[in-house]
Image (cartoon, helix red, strand yellow):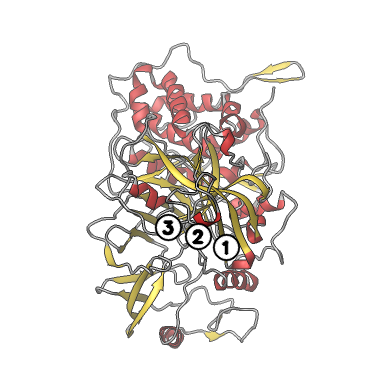
Amino acid sequence: MASLLPPYFLVLTALSFFIAASGGGVGGGGGGRLGLGLHHRFSAPVRRWVESRGRDLPGGWPEKGSVEYYAALAGHDRGRALNGGGGGGGGGGGGAAPAVTFSEGNATIKVSSLGFLYYAMVSVGTPSLTFMVALDTGSDLFWLPCDCSSCAPTSSASYGLEFESSFYSPNMSLTSQRVPCGNDFCEHQNECSETTQCPYKITYVSAGTSSSGFLVEDVLYLTTEDARPEIVEAQIVFGCGQVQTGSFLDAAAPNGLLGLGMEKISVPSILASRGLTSDSFSMCFGHDGFGRISFGDQGSSDQEETPLYVNQLHPTYNITITGISVENSSLNLDISTFFDTGTSFTYLADPAYSFLSETFDAQVQLNRYATDSRIPFEYCYSMSSNDTKFHAPNLSFTTEGGSLFPVSEPENFMTGLRVVFDRERKILGWKPFNCYDVEESSSLTVNSHNSSVLSPLPKSYTPEATRESGNGTEITTQLTPSLSHSSQSHLNCFKPAILAYHSNAFTACHSLHIANKLNASSTFPLLELFFKYQEKYYNAPTYRLSRASITGDFANLAATVVGENSLPALKSGFNDSQTDNAARISFKYGCSRGVTGTPFFFVNGMPLQDSGEPLDYKKWRSILDQLLGNKTVEGENV
């Protein structure tokens, strides 16, 4: 039987925010840093998800960078002011537990064509289901679509990312418990009796948007981020969202929302109160949209810091700005600002706004753009066809305590930084940071390609592809090993794009890096095995499996070509931060080019002319073999 690949598989392999650098063995409890992956609300994948269900964004989807695009973003922000609900009081706990992340991985990403919210992959329940949830520091409750009477359409069709969207049902999870009305997490105790389940309703100011249902408690799967990652099964209270209204029925949070606020019912608060992490978390957002999130991360000693001021009526992340500098001009002031991942732009009131805009305008050597009621900005500039760049004055904020907050992208001024929300010390911290980097790294157990620990490759092994039956003829094709990896610093992982499921494609890439580091001659044989068993790792057979299960399976598969004695080193390789980073970079480099031009696809910059159709194994081999033999980038074989 021919192996057919869905036409949009490259889109999903390109979106590295779904990628998990999986942890080790399965176990309960334990400290550790916990993290997750993010997706932006108005990204192309979410747009495809909406359109695949016969729906559309009211007024259409504005083109990125257009007047309509920025007007829509500004309009969303004006209606932001989320009215949190479902909890009262602050999170507790503390201690020195290391940080943790979601079991699906700590990688995050902004898909900029959907500009309102970021998304993360989370796994909940027994057996676990995976949800793509919106992340919001401006609200508190974590809720999922559940036993729905009014929810966003969800079917077996993908989000445009080969991701199976889910409904949660308490009756289908062995670990689910109803939260009674008398529970401390129940805010609406006056609306029910002590023996009945606790209801919730959160009304969001934007466009009559709300979520309502009842509270449940179940397992949220996390993984520690220390030297020996372990799965953590955290008991979390969240909302069984039976009724969604407003934008939740169109594009916003179609598969749930995870509040990161300061009330006791938020996930960071629960993790801290139950001793799983310190009462802190960090978010890193890179210039290219890649990022990370970690629960329990309290930052580093060299980060800048300023006090957090908590509004007791509705606790949010507020700091005090004491000055603004535009190039060599500065203004002293005293204003309170709110950090919110759900707001698209930075907003200032006078006198800060007038000083910044007028001083900026005086230093920009361009003509002002004519006033246009459609544009939500006062200061816009016209550039001629000869203008390829212009000088933007340096901009920074001075915070209480004297720390400078640099602004590299004024639209989203957390870009380029790791921002630490330390609720335990009531501190906001930040540091310029490359989100691909980690500050602590470990080494693989085996580093030498010629280590005597490894068994020789099985002499009987012949790299072969999936056998295809066509017109009664059995066809076997082989991947020509036309390049040597012995001196190559990393692989460019367009190769595992044969795996349609995004997370599995990255884990395959990660496996190739680990195998290549342990025994370079095993890389191509392992690649052949991924080709051979690609259907086994498609979405439908694996989306309910944990990351630990997938990585364990891949390690066992790799051991058949690297050597059976290498299995411990292969498993520990998934915990090696250097190999993880190399895999992330090469995966992104190899798969992300040209994706915005879908459905016209690219592999390492080479166009696929038949990209609109499923490609069987033989066709893929003809494409990849040619690329392996002919394509070079920056002096390296790829």
Q: Mark 1 points at which residue?
A: 203
Left or right of 27 on screen, residue 412: right
Q: Residue 85 carries which label?
A: 2
The answer, for residue 273, to whether it is visible in the render is yes
Question: What is the crowding at mark 1: few (fewer than 14 residues within 10 Å), some, or many (at least 20)?
Answer: some
The answer to whether the residues at label 2 and label 1 have Cβ atoms under 8 Å apart is yes
Q: What element carries label 1?
A: strand
Q: Quadrant of the N terminus?
A: top right
* Residue 551: image location, x then y, percent: 44, 30
* Residue 337: image location, x then y, percent: 40, 73
Q: What element carries label 3?
A: loop
Q: Distance between the residues labelled 1 and 3?
A: 32 Å
Q: Residue 407 carries which label?
A: none
Instruction: Identify residue type, mark 3.
Output: Gly
> Relative to the observer, which residue lies in front, 635 or 176?
176
> Relative to the observer, which residue lies in front, 469 or 52?
52
Q: Distance between the residues labelled 2 and 3?
A: 31 Å
Left or right of 5 on screen, residue 174: left
Q: Distance between the residues labelled 2 and 1?
A: 8 Å
Q: Furthest-left residue in view?
A: 301
Q: Name the residue under label 3.
A: 286
Give residue 395's quadrant in the image: bottom left
Q: Nearer the viewer, mark 2 or mark 3?
A: 2
